[in-house]
């Protein structure tokens, strides 16, 4: 009975931890335009514990999550090489792909893209308003976190629909 009680609240606790780690992502990205490797590694490292807590089968589900994370990393690395994203953003997206099923990750990317577009417009507006020179820095980790928060919230809010 103790094991069932433990595993019943553990997934929720881990999702709350993920949401809180994303708060840290936003704060550090806004302050320094950096998402540390340590923070991305922490997010990635808790994913296997989450898989275990929800009873995710090793094959094929865990393999799919790992493949999804690798695919997200490769695609977003292309954005990095094109100068459109920072390295921390790429690693964050890949780490989050360990947490979300493929369809949920696709939704996250769409929401992240929309939020990122709005964020970029806001940063450009501020950059011009302040008459700053050079290329503005967009804290894209904010958009990535927003996408993840929407997906996390849907898990609970859709129960009322």
Image (cartoon, rainbow, N blue to C red):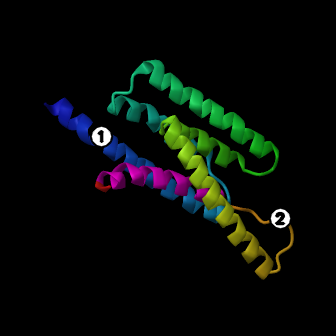
Q: Which residue is mark 2?
A: 135
Locate residue 3: give its quadrant: top left
On the rendered image, what quadrant is the N terminus found in? top left
- Relative vertical location of residue 109 with respect to residue 3 in this rendering, above or below: below
Return the residue found at the far left: 1
Label 2 crowd bin: few (<14), some (14–19), many (20+), radius 10 Å: few
Residue 139 in view (yes/no): no
Q: Position of residue 135 (x, y in %)?
A: 83, 64
Q: Which residues are magenta?
A: 139-159
Locate residue 4: give its quadrant: top left
Q: Earlier in the sequence, mark 2 or mark 1?
A: 1
Q: Position of residue 127 (x, y in %)?
A: 77, 74
Locate residue 59: give its quadrant: top left
Question: Would residue 123 appear left or right of 105 to someone viewing this image?
Answer: right
Seen at 68% across and 71% down, the residue is 122
Pick whichever, 21 or 149, lies toward us. 149
Pick whichever, 29 or 110, lies toward us. 110
Count up the numbered dots.
2
Seen at 51% across and 39% down, the residue is 103
Q: Position of residue 63 (x, y in %)?
A: 51, 22
Q: Which residue is mark 1?
A: 10
Return the residue found at the far front: 161
Pick whichever, 125 or 14, lies toward us. 125
Return the residue found at the far right: 133
Is mark 2 in CB contact (under 8 Å) with mark 1?
no
Residue 81 covered by magenta stretch: no
Seen at 65% across and 59% down, the residue is 116
Question: Would residue 36 appear left or right of 83 to someone viewing this image?
Answer: left
Residue 153 covered by magenta stretch: yes
């Amino acid at each position: 009975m103790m094991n069932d009680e433990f595993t019943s609240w553990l997934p929720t606790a881990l999702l709350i931890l993920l949401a809180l780690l994303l708060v840290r992502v936003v704060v550090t990205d806004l302050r320094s335009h950096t998402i540390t490797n340590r923070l991305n590694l922490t997010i990635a490292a808790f994913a296997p514990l989450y898989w275990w807590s929800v009873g995710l089968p090793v094959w094929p589900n865990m393999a799919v999550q790992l493949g999804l994370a690798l695919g997200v990393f490769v695609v977003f690395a292309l954005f990095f090489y094109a100068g459109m994203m920072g390295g921390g953003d790429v690693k964050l997206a890949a780490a989050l792909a360990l947490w979300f099923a493929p369809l949920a990750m696709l939704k996250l990317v769409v929401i992240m893209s929309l939020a990122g577009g709005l964020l970029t417009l806001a940063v450009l507006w501020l950059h011009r308003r302040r008459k700053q020179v050079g290329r503005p820095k967009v804290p894209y980790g904010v958009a990535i976190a927003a996408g993840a928060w929407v997906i996390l919230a849907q898990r609970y809010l859709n129960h009322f629909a």
